[in-house]
Amino acid sequence: MSLQETFEQASVDSKQLPQRPSDEDMLKIYSLYKQATVGDVTGDRPGIFDFVAGAKYDAWAEQKGKSGEVAMQEYVDLINKLKG
């Protein structure tokens, strides 16, 4: 199975985890997925009163410069860890 196929399967698996991940893990899942599929974050950070969007932006910004392949592999590894 290619990395792309493994990543796509992990994306499906992420919606069927045995328990809801912590907020920290949710942000990591989000940021790795976005980095793998879109690349580096662009645009301005959301306003200070939009806490969720700001946290998501910051998490994604932490992935800046990471290649799509590395982000995919880290995403797969994280989902597999959370699956137990």
Image (cartoon, rainbow, N blue to C red):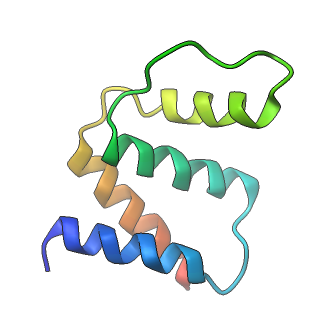
Q: Left or right of 81: which side holds 58?
A: right
Snapshot quadrant of residue 82: bottom right
Snapshot quadrant of residue 51: top right
Number of numbered callouts drawn: 0
Residue at the spot x=32%, y=70% of the render?
8
- Give the vertical position of 43 relative to 41 (above or below): above
Nearest the camera: 1 or 78?
1
Residue at the spot x=64%, y=56% of the render?
26
- Give the vertical position of 69 relative to 83 (above or below): above
Q: Position of residue 62 (x, y in %)?
A: 50, 30
Q: Left or right of 71: which side holds 51?
A: right
Q: Residue furthest right?
A: 49
Residue at the spot x=74%, y=61% of the render?
22
Residue at the spot x=69%, y=67% of the render?
21
Q: Left or right of 30: which side holds 80?
A: left
Q: Position of residue 48 (x, y in %)?
A: 81, 17
Q: Position of residue 16 (x, y in %)?
A: 58, 83
Quadrant showing the N terminus: bottom left
- Give the vertical position of 50 relative to 21 (above or below): above
Q: Position of residue 54 (x, y in %)?
A: 70, 27
Quadrant showing the C terminus: bottom right
Snapshot quadrant of residue 80: bottom left
Nearest the camera: 23 or 51?
51
